Amino acid sequence: MRGRAWMIKNGMIHLFLLAASVTLLFPFVWMVSGGFKDSLEVVKMPPQLLPSHWNFDNFRQIEQFFPLYRFLLNSVGVAVATTVLQLLVCAMAAYVFAKIAFKGNQAVFMLFLTTMMIPAQVTMVPLFILFAQTNLIDTYAGLILPGIFSAYGIFLLRQNIMTIPNELLEAAFMDGASYYRVFGSVILPLIKPTLAALTIFAFMSSWNSFLWPLIVTNSKELMTLPLGLSKLQGKWSTEWNLLMAGNVISFLPIFGVYLFAQRYFIKGMTMTGIK
Amino acid sequence: MVGQRKWNRRIAAFVFLLPALIGLAAFQLLPMASSVIISFSDWDLLSKWTQIHFIGWDNYADVFKDDKSYTSIKNIFIFLIGYMPFITVLGTFFAVLLNRNIRGIKFYRAAVFVPVITSWVAVSIVWRWLLNGQSGLVNYLLSLVGIQGPIWLQDDFWAMVAIIAVTVWKDIGFVSIILLAGLQDISDDYYEAADLDGASAWRKLWQITIPLLSPTLFFVVTISLINSFQLFDQVLIMTNGGPAGATSTIVEQVYRNAFQFNKMGFAAAQSWVLFVIIFSVTMVMQWLQRRWVVYER
């Protein structure tokens, strides 16, 4: 049944996908290898795929000028705080828009939806000024706060909460549960898959965010990894071994999370359409 | 009793909505309103709020008259000409292949996604090295087949080519995974019916796959357009907008004007022009979608 034509076709597909995977993955192999080479080997021609000796000096050398592990800690802290707060704020608002009727509910929801259209770059200049006036520049709060309000998150969770049957909520109210109780023990458990998808998305966009941290922080102690890496590049513009070592520190954590939670990444993105 | 329940409901609605409302007011509405006001002034961040001086529509006129600003808008359109065909055609092609049930498909699907999850800053630094004139791997590989590669990021033509290529490289996984989800929604019945009629693979692609995938394709095109107008990270890291403005972008100009030159008014006007462009593109796409896209009934 599987004839010659099938073999050729199948082979072609494998060949193409393999070539695509190599093109997409090889720069990361090269990055990791470069991060462990010494300053001579890293520019050696012809290039060598793997370092002849895996040395960790690059990381120590960066540490002398940049608190690389502080950047890492900042990134983790900011991303976790942003994600947790964003999920909570969005889920609370989504509950109201989906299930708690009041006059003007729809109008307020529309107001949220229309702000989705406004790109962050439009509000970035005045937001910086506002933060300067309220002394939020160069603080963790300044880094975290703008990231926790996501109209998109509210929209997604509202769509999900709307699918929960009203009878279920009514039954809980009959048992004497309050709105707060219903939120905590009925709504939240039922929207877990959407929350998981949103978690990945929120965490990743915070982890990779560059423009806002660039604007809002000045001191090294507050920098997140992407910003720290750009400062590394400012100091060593062609010391590739040091730059790659910095990249490795920023790449491995998110790559590790990806390996373990791959299907949530893909689900989160196909669901939200945001990367 | 009934009245009390009504009040409970109102209080609950208020409590649950409060954080989001504060966020909306403080981080969206207030900045938007002040952005409009600032865009009509020549405010420089250093002078006091009370001494704000209004200059009418001058900033908006300058968005198109100022050389750097005009170039940055033009560059985005040049970028789109290179980027959009690649990302849509290649993305569809990838998605079709990734939709096959072959051995190792899980690995392939996972692999295309790795560039997507990585930060633009890290990726840009890696590509700066790969594209470097002396120690870059790309030119080394080209030299193996007898081609003398350009000094990519310092050449005003090749720098834009490099930005386009690297952006396609990073985004292709995202686009193909979204399109793959669209493909998986197409029922096998259509293909089985076509097989019974003896339709060729080419015909099935054009008569079944593309029409039924068109809602997803439109979604992907719209998102890619919107993201393209917000190009920033890769440009700042890889070329810093250069050489001589050849890869400068609107957001890069907003950033420079606001935070390096303190031209807050001009930057605000530029960002509103950016908004109008994005808004118009979205509206046009919506209109086209109503005319072209096939929805399954």
Image (spheres, coloured by chain):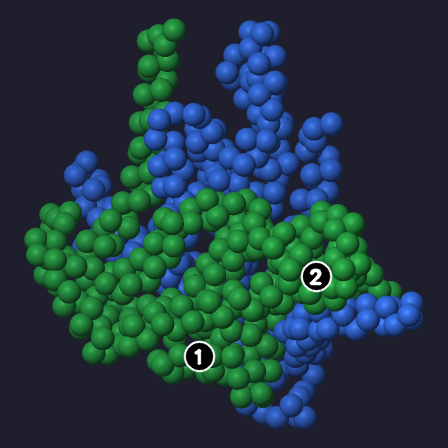
Chain colours: A green, B blue
State left or right for residue A63 relative to residue B17: left
Chain designation of label 2? A
Q: Residues within 10 Å of mark 1 (few under 14, many from 20)?
A: many
Q: Nearer the viewer, residue B195 or B223?
A: B195
Return the x and y of residue B271 as percentages of the image width and height: 60, 67
Q: Residue furthest front?
A: A175
For disc 1, the marked residue is: A217
* Amino acid type, mark 1: Thr
**Residue at the spot x=52%, y=65% of the render?**
A83
**Image quadrant assignment for residue A121:** bottom right
Q: CA distance from mark 1 to mark 2?
A: 40 Å
Residue nearest the observer in this picture, B116 or A126: B116
Place of residue B171 in the rendered image (x, y in percent of width and height, measured from the top left): 45, 47
Residues B205 and B144: in front is B205
Looking at the rendered image, the quarter that the N terminus of chain B falls into is bottom right
Is residue A115 shown to the viewer in this render? no
Q: Residue placed at 29% from the left, 63% from the top?
A: A249
Residue A170 higher or lower than B27, as above or below: above
Which secondary structure lies at badge 1? Answer: loop
Chain for mark 1?
A
Q: Is residue A80 visible?
A: yes
Q: From the viewer's perspective, tell me whether residue B116 is left or right of residue A173.
A: left
Question: As shown in the figure, which amino acid type bears the numbered disc 2?
Answer: Val
Q: Residue at x 74, y 27 (%)?
A: B297
> Mark 1 or 2 closer to N-term?
2
Answer with left or right where residue B37 lies relative to residue B108: right
**Residue B240 lies in quadrant:** bottom left
Q: Which residue is mark 2?
A: A182
Dot in front, 1 or 2:
2
Mark 2 nearby-residue class (10 Å; few <14, some 14–19, many ≥20):
some
